[in-house]
């Protein structure tokens, strides 16, 4: 999905005058400032945007590249920046969070109230023995409490690692074990789309799987009051521990480089990687991108629909908007419940002015509104909107145009923000008052981000030629390391072939010959993007072959899908004869459920095809590019002469 359209959408005249970055010349001036003196640029912004306890003495230390260190000598606290600073500057009574529950119940929390809640939670964590540098795994519902527990960890210098509530007990266990967490914070249940889904029970299962012996306690927020198992001595209810706590809590002042959080994400091989982010550099970019990319103003109501279990929820719910004193919506539910007009109703009700969502949500709502025209956005007053955002995967021009026209009323710029878990915040994105838009293109690098395109040997390519996306200079919110695996960090992101100090994003990209605008052409590794969720093909393969009774061999590839962007397609060789008809369907279902249990429902293969074998070269290597063609239903045009068993392709092309 690398198509772009040729139509240009200039910034609205008013925004080009009044935005934080007003007009293209203002954008270019920032780019030049950063080019001329990278360190002075970031140093200036770090002083402007953040409140430091002790000022930093050095902007960037490159002596141990690629283990870059930013803002040496500086100390600060992320929660202090997000809460105390705002209360001190008179925003105590301003609404920080507007929480809308799945059933429509609304709870508002001011900056003063949120600060008190975070302090109580932080005191509770300290009372449970959590100390600076300890890891805390958060497996939570979308809630004010979820945001507050993240902030509470930051307040005491504990390193949070949020695990998305859709991951299975096995996946949760792997993450808890890798972090060595001493505490898990969860809810009894979560509510989505009118259904109650377990959380606490899954935590119990995860801990029972073993390997999480460092966990001493489990802190539980009561969301539904449903019946859940409770282990006396280990489990503690928030509702019992929090009211005893003081409303104030002295923040732990940490070095700029102190890890703020770990967030696990999929790579092309091996187990998910614990991406480690810093406090100072990360928070700077979270706040700065929220200000410039969304042109955030004091009167805005910001709504990012992501879950706090993903990096988007970290940067554009928990940290960026709060660091700027914004009012934001936090939503527990799903876009299609009770029907597909939920987003439009909420935008109107809360007078949302900046709306940030994923292409997959847009595409599924387009479909839903075709089926039920009364739910189409045209029937709702969305005039409060001024800026729209897109994130997580390429947005195809058709979806872009619909979003622009029907949600944005043709008035609102769409910022198509390219970034990654590893980058901490936006990397390539339009700025709404500055950048003319082209549907399908994430346009130009954020000021200070030295993104470019190179070939396999690291040579920069001219505009018009596709290659690998890299970032030539470090930036403050970059990944610091992979938790417990610095070697893998170097190999994955700073490969020797590119000189060892250039960040390799893992995406292919091309720049427009005339404008230099970037278009992301998709991953260059074995990572899939399904509904904006990142998944390693190897991870799913490992899950499949872990079913040792049934599965002999499995290969997983992606194929294009109209709604989810990519869909997971698994080719499976069973330990028994190749099934057909009903038997094939029964086994396919069993394998899907198995993968859901091993990783989570988001990793379930959409297609499962059975073969007597997989297409292999004579040396036994699986030919994945052929499988990709088969999965996409394309005729095989590639050379198959090196294949040991070309006839297998016909068999695998059969859909059961
Ligand atoms: C991968 C990162 C960005 C936070 C959420 C996902 C793809 C992300 C875009 C975009 C084209 C995009 C890339 C990237 N991606 N945003 N605007 N246009 N592709 O974070 O799970 O770390 O995934 O998502 O392939 O590498 P993530």
Image (cartoon, helix red, strand yellow):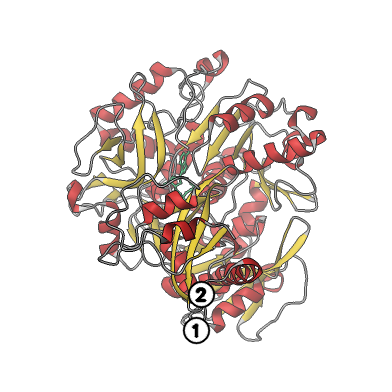
Question: Circles 2 and 1: CB distance less than 8 Å?
Answer: yes
Q: Residues within 10 Å of mark 1 (few under 14, many from 20)?
A: few
**What element does badge 1 sit on?**
loop
**What element does badge 2 sit on?**
helix
Q: Position of residue 312 (x, y in %)?
A: 52, 48
Residue found at x 71% / y 70%: 239
Residue found at x 51% / y 70%: 171
Q: Is residue 396 left or right of residue 454?
A: right
Task: Write down the residue under mark 2.
Answer: 173
View extreme (bottom): residue: 232
Q: Position of residue 502 (x, y in %)?
A: 24, 45
**Residue 251 at least partly seen:** no
Above or below: residue 503 compared with residue 556: above
Q: Residues within 10 Å of mark 2 (few under 14, many from 20)?
A: many
Q: Nearer the viewer, residue 196 or 159?
A: 196
Q: Nearer the viewer, residue 11 or 31?
A: 11
Image quarter (top left, top right, bottom left or bottom right) of the C terminus: bottom right
Above or below: residue 332 compared with residue 609: above
Residue found at x 43% / y 51%: 628
Q: Earlier in the sequence, mark 2 or mark 1?
A: 2
Residue found at x 49% / y 61%: 570
- Residue 210 is marked as 1
> Is the C-beta of the residue carrying label 2 under 8 Å from the nearest atom of ligand 1?
no
Above or below: residue 235 compared with residue 310: below
């Amino acid at each position: 999905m690398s198509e772009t359209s040729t139509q240009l959408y200039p910034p609205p005249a008013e925004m080009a005058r009044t935005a934080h970055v007003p007009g293209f010349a203002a954008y270019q001036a920032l780019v030049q400032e950063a080019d001329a003196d990278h360190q002075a640029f970031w140093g200036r912004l770090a002083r402007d945007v953040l409140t430091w306890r002790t000022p930093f003495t050095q902007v960037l230390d490159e002596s141990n590249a690629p283990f870059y260190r930013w803002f040496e000598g500086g100390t600060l606290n992320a929660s202090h920046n997000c809460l105390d600073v705002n209360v001190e500057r008179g925003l105590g009574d301003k609404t920080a969070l507007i929480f809308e529950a799945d059933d429509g119940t609304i709870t508002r929390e001011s900056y003063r109230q949120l600060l008190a809640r975070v302090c109580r939670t932080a005191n509770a964590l300290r009372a449970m023995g959590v100390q600076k540098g300890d890891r805390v795994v958060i497996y939570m519902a979308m809630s004010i409490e979820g945001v507050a527990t993240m902030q509470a960890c930051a307040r005491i210098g504990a390193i949070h690692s949020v695990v998305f509530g859709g991951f299975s007990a096995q996946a949760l266990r792997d993450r808890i074990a890798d972090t060595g967490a001493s505490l898990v914070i969860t809810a009894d249940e979560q509510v989505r789309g009118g259904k109650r889904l377990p959380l606490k029970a899954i935590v119990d299962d995860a801990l029972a799987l073993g390997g999480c012996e460092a966990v001493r306690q489990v802190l539980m927020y009561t969301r539904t009051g449903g019946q859940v198992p409770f282990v006396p001595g280990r489990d503690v209810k928030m509702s019992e521990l929090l009211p005893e706590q003081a409303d104030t809590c002295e923040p732990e002042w940490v070095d700029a480089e102190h890890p703020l959080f770990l967030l696990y994400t999929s790579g092309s091989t091996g187990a998910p990687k614990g991406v480690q982010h810093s406090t100072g550099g990360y928070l700077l970019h979270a706040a700065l991108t929220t200000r410039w990319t969304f042109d955030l103003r004091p009167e805005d109501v910001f709504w990012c629909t992501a879950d706090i279990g993903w990096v988007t929820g970290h940067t554009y719910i928990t940290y960026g908007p709060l660091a700027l004193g914004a009012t934001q919506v936090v939503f527990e539910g799903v876009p299609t419940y009770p029907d597909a007009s939920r987003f439009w109703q909420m935008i109107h009700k809360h007078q949302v002015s900046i709306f940030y969502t994923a292409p997959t949500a847009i595409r599924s709502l387009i479909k839903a509104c075709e089926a039920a025209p009364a739910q189409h956005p045209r029937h709702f007053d969305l005039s409060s909107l001024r800026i729209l955002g897109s994130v997580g995967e390429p947005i195809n021009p058709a979806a872009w145009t619909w979003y622009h026209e029907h949600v944005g009323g043709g008035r609102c710029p769409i910022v198509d923000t390219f970034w990654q878990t590893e980058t901490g915040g936006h990397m390539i994105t339009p700025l709404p008052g500055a950048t003319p838009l082209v549907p399908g293109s994430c346009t130009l690098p954020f000021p200070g981000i030295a993104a470019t395109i190179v070939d396999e040997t690291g040579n920069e390519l001219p505009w018009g030629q596709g290659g690998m996306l890299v970032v030539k200079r470090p930036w403050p919110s970059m990944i610091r390391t992979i938790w417990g695996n610095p070697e893998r960090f170097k190999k994955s992101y700073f490969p020797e072939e590119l000189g060892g100090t250039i960040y390799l994003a893992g995406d292919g990209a091309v720049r427009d010959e005339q404008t230099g605008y970037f278009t992301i052409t998709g991953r260059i590794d074995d990572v899939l993007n399904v509904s904006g969720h990142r998944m390693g093909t190897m991870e799913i393969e490992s899950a499949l072959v872990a079913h040792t009774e049934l599965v002999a061999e499995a290969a997983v590839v992606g194929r294009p899908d109209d709604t989810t962007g990519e869909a997971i397609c698994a080719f499976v060789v069973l330990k028994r004869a190749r099934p057909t008809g009903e038997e094939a369907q029964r086994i396919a279902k069993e394998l899907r459920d198995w993968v859901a249990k091993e990783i989570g429902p988001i990793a379930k293969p959409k297609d499962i095809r059975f073969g007597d074998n997989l297409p292999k070269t004579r040396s036994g290597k699986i030919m994945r590019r052929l499988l990709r063609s088969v999965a996409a239903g394309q005729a095989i045009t590639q050379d198959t002469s090196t294949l040991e068993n070309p006839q297998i392709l016909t068999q695998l092309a059969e859909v059961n």
